[in-house]
């Protein structure tokens, strides 16, 4: 399997093995299958509400059904599939209410991470944040069908940098998992150039507050970032509700 450390794969590894940096070289067979399927789901190769069949996966990966079943359970733990009686594994298709709940938790935890980042920041951290902000600005102005995916990828990497500065591995692991569970909906919420430009402004405010040592304002800016994506994603879900599981 391909083990190159893409941003998405690093996020997945952090969720699979919280607090245990891993380049993928020691993953079990089931974990390798989990990574590939998670990437497929998050890149829309499996539609929300769609079934994932064990037999087809066994044939695809040339393994017995044991590692496949374990991989599907790991995906369920990550919130990317649901294992239903008589239907098997189904790709998660969240309702607007479920999306709102997940984003609410994510906003609160990201606010905490931002507050902690103020206390722990170094000059090198601030330089890194400004470099990531420049990357966001470039992605925000990009055109094409993959523009939102490129932007969300850059946002995810920026978030990981904030978690690292916050210095709490459990908090980072929880946030990484929530990012995965909400990734498809974050893409919805950042699907227009106007929203991406607004997001850049919010990130710039967050960096300014962290750099200037304003913990309360940093926490508020971090919450606003997540809440804006939530509001836009819910608005778009209302126009295009997910299929029933």
Image (cartoon, helix red, strand yellow):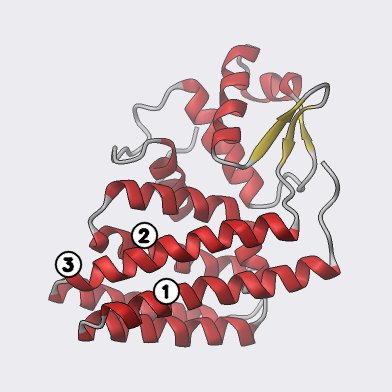
Q: What element carries label 3?
A: helix
Q: Identify the residue at image location x=85%, y=46%.
A: 244
Between disc 3 and disc 2, whose residue precedes? Answer: 3
How many C-alpha atoms fall within 10 Å of the one at disc 1: few (<14), some, or many (≥20)?
A: many
Between disc 1 and disc 3, whose residue precedes? Answer: 3
Residue 52's image quarter?
Answer: top right
Which label is found at residue 120? 3
CB contact under 8 Å: marks 2 and 1: no
Residue 62: give x, y in percent of width and height: 63, 18
Q: Name the residue under label 1.
A: 222
Decide: is 216 above or below 23. below
Residue 209: give x, y in percent of width and height: 29, 84
* 3D distance between C-alphas at marks 2 and 1: 13 Å
Q: Mark 2 points at which residue?
A: 160
Q: Which of marks 2 and 1 is in front?
A: 1
Q: Which of marks 3 and 2 is in front?
A: 3
Q: Is mark 1 on a helix, strand or loop?
A: helix
């Amino acid at each position: 399997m391909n083990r190159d450390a893409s941003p998405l794969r690093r996020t997945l590894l952090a969720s699979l093995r919280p607090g245990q940096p891993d380049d993928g070289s020691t993953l079990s067979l089931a974990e390798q299958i989990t990574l590939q399927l998670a990437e497929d789901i998050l890149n829309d190769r499996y539609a929300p509400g769609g079934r994932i069949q064990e037999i087809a996966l066994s044939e695809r990966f040339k393994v017995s059904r044991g590692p496949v079943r374990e991989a599907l359970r790991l995906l369920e733990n990550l919130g990317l599939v649901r294992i239903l009686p008589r239907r098997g594994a189904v790709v998660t298709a969240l309702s607007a209410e479920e999306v709102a709940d997940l984003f609410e938790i994510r906003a609160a935890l990201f606010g905490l991470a931002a507050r902690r980042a103020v206390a722990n920041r170094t000059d090198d951290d601030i330089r890194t944040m400004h470099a990531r902000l420049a990357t966001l600005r470039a992605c925000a102005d990009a055109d094409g069908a993959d523009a939102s995916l490129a932007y969300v990828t850059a946002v995810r990497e920026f978030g990981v940098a904030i978690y690292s500065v916050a210095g709490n591995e459990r908090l980072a692991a929880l946030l990484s998992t929530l990012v995965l569970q909400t990734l498809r909906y974050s893409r919805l919420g950042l699907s227009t150039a106007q929203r991406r430009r607004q997001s850049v402004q919010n990130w710039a405010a967050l960096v300014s507050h962290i750099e200037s040592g304003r913990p309360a304002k940093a926490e508020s800016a971090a919450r606003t970032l997540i809440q804006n994506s939530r509001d836009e994603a819910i608005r778009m879900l209302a126009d295009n509700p997910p299929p029933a599981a």
